[in-house]
Each structure stands twice: as C-alpha cells, then as structure tokens.
Amino acid sequence: MDIHIYDTKRRKKRRFEPLDENHVTIYVCGPTVYDRVHIGNGLSAVVFDVFVRILRTVFPNVTYVRNVTDIDDKINARALELGVPIDELARECTDAMHEDFDALGVLLPDVEPKATGHIKEITTMISSLIQQGHAYEAEGHVLFYVPSDPNYGSLTNKSLKDLIDGARVEVAPYKRDPKDFVLWKPSSPELPGWKSPWGRGRPGWHIECSAMIREHLGDEIDIHGGGTDLAFPHHENEMAQSGCFNDNPDYVKYWMHNGMLNLGSQKMSKSLGNIQTVQELLHEHPGETLRYAILSGHYRQNLKWDDELIAQSDRSLTSLYQALRNAERVAGESPTSEAYAQTKIADLPDEVLAPLSDDLNTPRALAGMHELASKLNVSTDVKEAQSLRDKLLGGGWLLGLLTRSVSEFFTQDASVGEVEINRLIDERAEAKAAKQYDRADEIRAELRAKGIAIEDTREGTVWKVVKQ
RNA sequence: GGCUGGGUGGCAGAGUGGCCAUGCUGCAGACUGCAACUCUGUUUACGCCGGUUCGAUUCCGACCCCAGCCUCCA
C-alpha cells in the first residue's frame, strides 16, 4: 500500500518512500509546556497520531519522536510569576498535557525527549557549527550566521531580500546579520542555565530540535511534522543548523505541516489570548467528540472551531455508535476499536485506509466510516453484519474513534439508576400490552425529562442518555 | 510588500474535465399505537471575469476576498 504525503518543501504531494523500509522515522514538534495545552495543540497531536497509526499499519517498525520544549523564556516568566521552580512547572504541565492528549485518544510517542535532557548534544552541535564557520560568539551569545548557509530560505521559499523587507524584529547590535538567530544565550543567576564554552547559559529554541532529532533518530529522517506556524522561522532555522552541521540540507525527506485551528476568523494562540484549553472543553464534551471534530477537516486546511462544529461532530459520532448498537441485535455485542489495534492491513476497510494513505484525508475516511455504518444498519445476515462491524471498528482504530463500548457510549452518566430505568421500562411494556398508551407515554416522558430516551426495537426496549 | 494555503449547496467538508461525495440540519414518506432508532426520497453548489475544450466547479491567465507566516506559537 502506497502512502502519499504533501511535502511542504517541494510543495507537492509525493509518494512516500522511506530511507529504510524496515524502520520509518518521524519527528514532530510538540508544545512548549508552561500552561495547559489548547485545542490547537490538540489538533496537531491528533493529526500526527492518526498519521503514525497509518505508518504503523503499513511499515513493520516506526519510531515516532515528539519533543517537549521545557526550557524557554515563557516558561521562565511563568515559573517566576507562580513562584515555582522551572523544572517543576515543566513537569506538571507535561503531566497535564499527557492527561489532555490521552482524553483525545492520542497514543504516546515512542520517545518524548526534553530539551533540558540534551544540553550536551546541543553544545556539541553548536561547537561544531562555530568550527565550520556557520556560527559565532558575541557578548555571551552564540548566533547562527545566516549568510553562511546557501540554502537558507529553501524550505519556505523565502528570499533573503524579502526577509529584510518584512523584518519586524528589532535587531540586536551584536548580530553580524539581521537574520542571524540565537543558538545559545546567557542566563542571569536567577534563570536556569548550564555551563558551556560560552559561559553559563541556555539553548535557543531551534537548536533543541536539531540536537534531539540527531540523538534519537540519526542524521537523516523520513518525516518532520509540526504546525504550519512553525515552518518559518523554526523549521527553516532548524534546517539551516542540521543542514550545515552535516552539509546535508535534505536530511528531512518529507516535511508535513498541519493547518491552524481558528476561533472566529483568527488562529487560536496563546499570544492572541483567544484560546480554549483541552481541559475546559473536556468539561463540556467527551474527548472523542473533540477528536471527531478535529478529524472532520483536512489537516492542511484551517479548521474553524465553534460550538456548531462540536454539535455536528457529536451527532455524527453518535450515528456511528448507533450503527454498532443496531448491529448488536444481529451480530452480537461489539468490542471497542481498541480490540482492532493489531488488525492486518488486508482486513482493514479500504473505504478508510485508502483516503488516509492519500495525504491523510480524514474527511473522506469519515465518509467511508459512514458508508460502512449505513451498510451495517441494513444488514440482516449475521456473517455480513459481523464483517461490516469488524471493518467499521478497524477503521475506528485507524482514526482513534469508537474507543468506547456501545453501552458506555449510550448509557454512561445516566441521572437515573439502571434498576429504576428497567423497572419503568417494564412498567411501560405492561401498559403497552394492555393498550394503556397514555400511561406508556407518561412513563416515556418521565424518563425523557430525566435525560433518558427510549427506543423500541423488535427485540425489546433500549434506552440511552441524551442531552437535555 | 514577499512567501504559503484557500474560496463548493442551510451548516461542516471531500472530490472530479462530462455521472452519487459524506455527515449534520430542513422537508416529505416507510416502519411504529404514537415516538425514538433505522430506511427511502428531496430543495438551493462549486468567488468574479476571460481563455483552452465537443464539454470546466475541476486545466490556464487576470481580478476580488479570506486565513497563515515574515515576532513567541501546534
């Protein structure tokens, strides 16, 4: 099965050919941890989570590295504000991030490196760049000398002239060139710092990723991912560092960038202050609904995030579960999609697999899920229904959906005890049998008022929790 | 100003040189004692102007509009 990826650098969709068929390597930039992650961070995590699931079904061995930036000026500022040590803040935020991502159905990466654990690798790389004439020391800082890199700008198609024209940054006086960026900067005594040949200090943001990629995945990797807002300057700078270090600007074979999640017409971002944290959203909606909402748009497109999107996602997801529920009458109780984690590629539904392998087309994959669900709804043959249900759940595994059991989905958080519900259902059945429809409807209304909706099927009455 | 992506029916959102996306919603029907679930049917599409073509929403060109990046950011 072929996978196609839109490569940001080449600006076209390309067939994915790994450096080593037996070991695929992917690195994704994770969030900087100084607060609760927002749903935009969640989007990136979910997108690459699905992508890695596809990679794992196609290739025997995949190493997925997603870093955590745990040293950064914002973390310092926040830690100072809260009066807690930097490492404690970073650790707490990382734990919280795991909790939030887990609720979104995001599996852990194989390696989750932290910048603070790679100071040695970082300084080694910086020293080499200085030796090679790509970096220089100035007033305790080490800066990357951009004009030394003939390929600078080639990732995001920027010319050096345009950058000067558009410069909005105040240029530090010690810079040789206005575009030079920091690899190492001095730390004052109250800030975290590490010893280095250039004095006590801390690494710049971009060099962290260069060093961690090299440490965990080697000098060349298959795929590098992240948000489109990271393409410039972060990835461009990273490419300059890693590319110059080994004289190999093509050390990343495919660059993937996810689009932005918009609140209103603007990108959700901490600096704009228009954020919704995953935690807040989880108070109102199941993580699976949020995940469905994220996957309802293509990853390279911006996603307009609002209540209507969540409401539509909730209804759409419910219809998939409803198909599973209906199928239980024919095919027996359904497992969750977790049970399909090891499904072989031949047993996975083409309706879902094909779109996902075509540059992660999740909207079409969801369409495929609904096609399967429709077929399942009308199937009366046990074998056929079981096969369709297996396909639906196999697709669910790829997408990270249908992770709850049918009964959990429909009956969790009921405001009335199950015994009481069943008693009322029995009473209603008796009333119906006696053709006392007024009484039957009264019971139904009574339950509905408590958020319990009733469905009569040929095999008897079932119930579910509904929103008031 | 430069560099990226986009502009599709009530909403969300794929896709294609000529035929059904899909989901949600609305409406109508079937099923049901009535509902719910499910099924069936159904309305309004491809920013604007040219060009290529037998035929363009889809290819090419101009224009308008939107978002992202050029500062920390997924």
Image (cartoon, grey):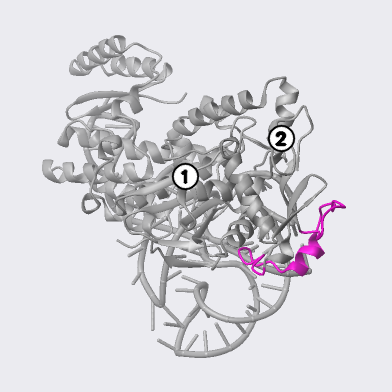
**What amino acid is at disc 1?**
Val
Quadrant in which the N terminus of chain A is drawn? bottom left
Residue to which mark 1 is pinned: A65
Few, some or many residues within 10 Å of mark 1 (<14, 14–19, 20+): many
**Where A222 sits versus A452, above or below?**
below
Q: Nearer the viewer, residue A41 or A55?
A: A55
Residue at 49% x, 49% y: name it: A27
Q: Nearer the viewer, residue A312 or A249?
A: A249
**What amino acid is at disc 2?**
Lys
Residue at 52% x, 45% y: name it: A44
**Where A82 sits versus A321, above or below?**
above
Left or right: A310, with A460 as reference point: right
Left or right: B39, with A173 as reference point: left
| Residue A24 painted magenta | no
Q: Nearer the viewer, residue B25 or B53?
A: B53
Say what secondary structure mark 1 lies in.
strand
From the top left corner, tell me how far across and down residue A146 is, in percent: 72, 62
| Residue A151 painted magenta | yes
From the top left corner, tell me how far across and down residue A104 is, in percent: 46, 35
In the rendered structure, which segment of residues is drawn in magenta?
A150-179
Residue to which mark 2 is pinned: A74
Distance of mark 1 from mark 2, alpha carbons? 23 Å
Few, some or many residues within 10 Å of mark 2 (<14, 14–19, 20+): some
Question: Residue A164 occupies which quadrant of the picture?
Answer: bottom right
Dot label at residue A140:
none
Q: Nearer the viewer, residue B47 or A150?
A: A150
Q: What secondary structure predominates along the stretch shown in magenta?
A: loop
